[in-house]
Amino acid sequence: MKNISMNAKYLKIFSLIFVLPFIIFDFLYSWFIDISYNKYHEFFVSFTKNLGPISNSSLFSDSSVGWCAKLSSMPWAHRLLGMLVDIVSLGLFLWGFFVFLSLLSSYQKGVVFSQESFFLLKKLSKISFVWVLYSPIKDTLLSVICTLHNPPGQRIITVSFSSRDIYHIFFVGVIFVITSLIYEGYIIKKEQDLII
């Protein structure tokens, strides 16, 4: 149990120091820095491509604004509308992130097989499921918004279901399996407590 508590502590610290700032930086980078003129763009793209399967996530790539050759050519109203569409995905991710941190806090206290852990994992599963469903919708909306200022004939609407979405579905499936295992462990522990 001490090992679980220690691992939860280190994962929580790592998440707060590295993951959270990177996610926020990526969102700000995508919408406030003109990608075509930024000297750090090549470094950032090569860095995120080296993350493996996670780099396919919209939060770790500039695919959110991939249809925008130059952000500076977009009117501010369109850029703000695109940011609003993209911020829903960021909000879902952050909500799930903080639920995950609550789960880690529970594990740090040594409470692994409990009703609290089950409900936190169930909540994380639901948030992840909504995030998975929203991702292709977000990409479709962003393709329209980012090309809305183009003349007729040069506007784009894309509807896609990619390998990134399959990764997300797999991730949600893993969370569902873990949630059911935690619940079964909780029931066994509760039965054992009643016997003793």
Image (tube, rainbow, N blue to C red):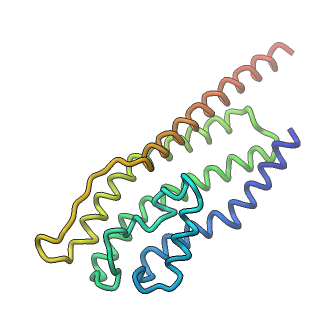
Q: Is residue 94 shown above or below 84? A: above
Most extreme residue toward the top is 195
In the displayed structure, does residue 159 sit left or right of residue 98? Answer: left
Residue 106 image point, x, y percent: 74, 45
Along the line of sight, the residue nearer the viewer: 71 or 187: 71
Image point (29%, 84%), residue name: 73
Along the line of sight, the residue nearer the viewer: 113 or 174: 174
Along the line of sight, the residue nearer the viewer: 158 or 105: 158
Most extreme residue toward the left is 152
In the displayed structure, does residue 107 sit left or right of residue 178? Answer: right
Residue 72: quadrant of the picture: bottom left
Q: Is residue 41 shown above or below 156? A: below
Residue 35: quadrant of the picture: bottom left
Along the line of sight, the residue nearer the viewer: 62 or 176: 62
Residue 58 image point, x, y percent: 45, 60
Image point (41%, 83%), residue name: 34
Residue 89: quadrant of the picture: bottom left
Image point (27%, 52%), residue name: 159
